[in-house]
Image: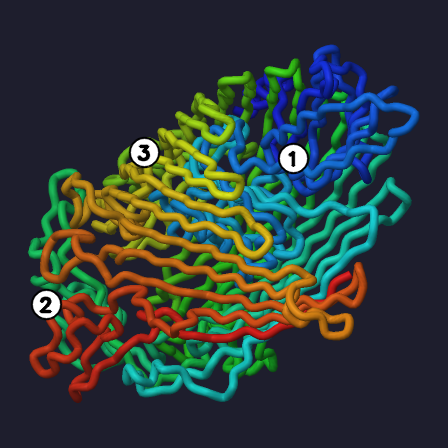
Amino acid sequence: MKRFLPLMFLFFLPHLLLAGVTGKIAGIITDATTGEPLPGVNVILKGTSMGAASDMQGYYVILNIPPGTYTLEASFVGYKNVVVNEVVVNVDLTTRIDIKMEETTLETSEAITVIASRPMIRKDEVSTRHFVSSQDMELQPITSFKEAAQFQPGVVGTHFRGGRAGEVLVLIDGIPVRDPAGTYSGSFGGFTSDVPKLGIEQMEVSLGGFSAEYGNVQSGILNLALKEGSKDFSGRLRFSAKPGFGATTSFTEHGYRFKLLQPLENYYEGSITGPLYKNKISFSASAQIIDQNQGFYPNENSYKQNYQGKLTFKFSPNLKLSVGTVINRNEWDNFYFPASKYGPGPNYQKDTYYKGVRSGTDTLEVYRYVFDKNLYGKIETKNESGLFDSTAYNVVKTYYMAGMQEYLWHNKQASNLFYLTWTHSLSAKTFYEIRLNSFYSNYHYATRDIEDRDGDGDRNEDLEWDISKPGPHPIYREREDNFWWLRGDDPGYRDQKSWTQTLKADLVSQINSNHLLKGGVQLDYHTTKVENISWTLGVGIYRYDVWTQNSLDFGAYIQDKIEYQGIIGLVGLRFDAFDPNGLYDDIYYPADYANPFITVGPDGIPILQNPKKASIKYQFSPRIGISHPITEKSILHFTYGHYFQRPDGYFLYRNHYLQSLTKVGNYVGNPDLSPEKTVAYEIGVEQQIGNDYKITLTGYYKDITNLMNYYKYVARSVGDRELNVYMNADYGNSKGFEVTFSRRMGKFFGGNLNYTYSIAKGRSSSASGGANSWNSVKRMNYLSFDQTHTVNAILNFRTPEDFGTLIGSFHPFGNWMVSMLFKYGSGLPYSSYGTDRINDKRMPATHNLDLKLMKELRFSARYGMRLFVDVFNVYDRHNVRFIGDNQYYELGDPNDPTIKGDPSVIWREADGSYVRTPLAYSPGRYIRLGFELFF
């Protein structure tokens, strides 16, 4: 691969492609009287250096336009100028503006000004895409762009159209941002960064039918186009807070034996944009800080910081350089309901199986492996290959309510993204871009030494894995052995660092009015360093996962956007490859995990039996999309595509050296994993009703293969130790349809209502399901995120500035805005008690309403302020998030039948009282008050 990648790069270099964060404007210019095309008409976007001239057929096109709203002006000798206001440009789409020009006379030479029509039907949209503008995000009661994405049809939390949580790709200004280790941290597929809401110009949410320009993704794309510097200074400064009011929550109604304080959170947000030097250099910057003193649950303190900045240099109308950064810093504590106490109990370090069901009430005897004959009704057996056919034990944990909760895992997460984009327009219809970027991500957790138990005077260091002095330190640190705290002081430590360097080269050319060609290459170099110590069993006895590895990804694609009067097509081919060996030493794995090694080398690393080298994996992926405009107000579209996603480093390299193996519970990465694959189909129809309404119906089907899971082996050559090895051992599929009814924002109101019907099935819901353990029968089950019915509603109301009675120079009823977000979800699956069935029952349905009320006060045309209040969970509903103990939930207790149906019960103490977890319910109602200054 080290020789193969440069050859591929040189081969595909002539076919470069843009990863779209811009759109285009195109149209035909004709004589208003004769209808004849007008060649040579000059068309410009006012306030920018972008423009074009019409050809002999009157056709013009302006490429590479950042999303936003523009004013277009057409001028031609002997004709009146035409000014078109409110021209909206979206990412990757064509805004069609046809212009009819009138001949001028001596008497009438003034320009003709028109408002661009905004058709709700985008004829060149060949797949399901939703656009959320900066204005939308400002109006809605949300904190992050991620929340806005979750109100789109087909989205359930971080799952897009029935896919797993790690199958979503986030792009920032066209740059994929993903931690290559992936599963250890982050959301939306290893997205460990964040972007201030005020720094986003537009977000594109794609749920299927991705064009060939997008790789390493299976289920969804969030494409963020950040704001660019403007010709005039403008900015916003916003502060909001969730006041505590000194009240307790209604969780005390459920008998938790303690009171939860209302959260106290402060939000600081700001943005500024403007010129630095004439029209040559401009900038934009934004920031968001969230300081949470107390979360809705105890011990959820957090401090989050997100910063973004961009400099744009316009050396000439044809040359542009953009330099940007996104910086993220987070710290937070975890709420740990199972409590902590001095210990350990006498049986804690035993690794044998205990007979009987939940024997004993000593709360210090935790993490006991207990045989439960009612769990799945199976008996543990081993076959000749060393695999477990079924597993009949369960980990039973006891709980102690009055424990010390100060000793919690303290989490730190940081990321830095730096990028450079060079854009060169070779002609009015052809340009190329070169992007360089570097992304760093760090995730760290440990227990803090807040009591200075080691006596070194430092109360901010880690407790379990203490670095005694600055400078270099051994990677295997000694655990403090004088104290042992269970739960709330878990003996765990993790430090993960990842680096990604990316080179992208892109070319776009409008060959003629019917064909827009794109082509491009991308090369990613990843390095990940992981130090993970977990499940300490005693002094000097612990399980560790320590590795440093680099890898290479390569992608190339070519695509043609074909636009004719009656049909629009998007046809492309993508090539993806990844090399788990990286640039240095090749990586090997045992040919037989039931007999991986016999001896250990002098460096402490096992010497593998019959080692095999990890191989390069690649795939060609065809992508086809077709849009057929049936009428001016209706279209039919269809897409088909193959999609490729490389395994996360977590699955490739986790403890692949096979060190520190304990009797059970060893998870081992597999560097020879194949990519996960999805084949997806989509068909949809859109119909505009009148000028302001639209209804959309879309059906989809996804077939997902090579999903991650693990096989359980018994390594007989190393003392019958259990190895859980990640394999391409799972399969899933999802199907459904989405209906959206939308109303564009008019004078007073707008919004949309969407409904999704979905069925998501597979063998396991995640990579931790165990492909050959108790659910070894190859049957399809409802996945844990299968939400059959989902309803989202976004309703926005506003009053014009001059609405209502005029009092002096003030309209008290003008510029009021109300936004409501409603979400309903049918119950998620869970497994019934005492059977071998999986996800055969459903939790109660959930629904929630959030509201924002805002009043805008203007001091002048440029300056003003906004006062707002956000109300979350308006009717204070406690939605069920999970079932604490399905036995109590389904059967209750003979001593107390009233607990039947209570999802929060997790344990019954010896005195007959019940331990409940408030995490089983969603947070209740809370309020956020704020104000904003803008100029």
Please, what secondary structure does the residue beneath circle 2 have?
loop
Residue 609 place in picture, x, y as percent: 31, 35
From the viewer's side, name the closer residue of 424 and 710.
Answer: 424
Residue at (83%, 36%) from the top-left corner? Answer: 314
Q: Which residue in the protein does label 3 denote?
A: 701
Q: Which mark is residue 355?
A: 2
Tell me: 739 left or right of 8: left
How far apart are the alpha carbons under marks 3 and 1? 29 Å
Give the foreground label among 2 and 1: 1
Q: Is residue 237 left or right of residue 531?
A: right
- Which numbered disc, 2 or 3, marks the residue closer to the eye? 3
Residue 835 on image: x %, y %: 10, 56
Inspect the image, locate mark 3, and give the three-letter code of the amino acid beneath it: Tyr
Residue at (40% x, 54% y) in the render: 792
Residue farthest to the top, as pictured: 56
- Closer to the chain start, of discs 2 and 1, is 1
